[in-house]
Amino acid sequence: MKVPNLLIIAGTGNKAGKTTMACRIIEKFRDRGIVAVKITPHFHETTPGLERVVEKPGLSVYEEKNSNTSKDTSRMLAAGASSVFFAKVTGETLSEAFLEILKHIPEGAPVVCESPALRYYFDPGLFIVMRSLLEGNQKDIGELLKFSHKEFTLNDISGNRQLPVGFSYGTWFSL
C-alpha cells in the first residue's frame, strides 16, 4: 500500500541514529503538524506518559503525552511532533497496528515512523536507512537496504547541516 505522506527510518544497528534523525526531521517540519510513530516488537513494561489508544491481542498502541523523559517517544514530542504514537506489536500485527494509528492522524499529515519492518507492508514516500558506525553493532537488514531511498550516518546529520529531505503536496521526497 502506497503511503506518500509516510517517511520510514530504519537502522543497521542500535545507536545508529534513527531517533536522532526522526527528531531532526520533526524539528524541520514542526510547523506542518508532523506526527511521529515508533513501533517495536518488544513487549516490555509500559512507562508513565503513555496513554492507551488501542489494545488487541498481539498489539498495543499508545499516545505519548510526556515530553520530559529520555524515551525515544518523549524526545520526538519534545522535538515538536503534534502527536507521537508508540506501538508494541508481533510480526503478524504490525500492519494492523499501523492502520489503527492512521485512524488517529489527520489525512495527509506528514508522518515519520521509526520501524524498519513497516517497509515490508507499506510503500512510503521516503525510506531512510541510518548506518551504524559502531563495530559489532550491525543488524542484518540487507533485504530492506534494496528499498532505501537515502542512507546516512550520525556524522552525516551532525551539527547544523541541512537535511536533504522535503515534504510537499502530501509527499516526502529527497532533495
Image (spheres, helix red, strand yellow):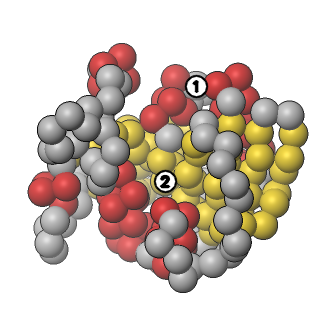
Residue at figure coordinates x 58%, y 25% from the top left: 121
Q: Is residue 25 visible?
A: no
Q: Amino acid at mark 2?
A: Val
**Alpha-carbon distance for marks 2 and 1?**
16 Å
Q: Nearer the viewer, residue 28 or 43?
A: 43
46 shown above or below 94: below
Residue at figure coordinates x 19%, y 55% from the top left: 154
Residue 121's mark?
A: 1
SS of the residue under disc 1? loop
Q: Residue furthest bottom?
A: 68
Residue at figure coordinates x 58%, y 45% from the top left: 39
Q: Is residue 19 visible?
A: yes
84 shown above or below 44: below
Taking the image as shown, residue 111 lies to the left or right of residue 21, namely right
Residue at figure coordinates x 68%, y 37% from the top left: 89
* Rendering coords of residue 21 (x, y %): 32, 58
* Rendering coords of residue 135 (x, y %): 15, 38
Q: Nearer the viewer, residue 107 or 136?
A: 136
* Rendering coords of residue 117 (x, y %): 51, 30
SS of the residue under disc 2? strand
User: Which residue was labeled with disc 2?
Assistant: 112
Q: Quadrant of the N terminus?
A: top right
Q: Earlier in the sequence, mark 2 or mark 1?
A: 2
* Rendering coords of residue 50 (x, y %): 72, 67
Q: Amino acid at mark 1?
A: Tyr
- Label 2 crowd (10 A; few <14 / some 14-19 / many >=20): many
19 shown above or below 114: below
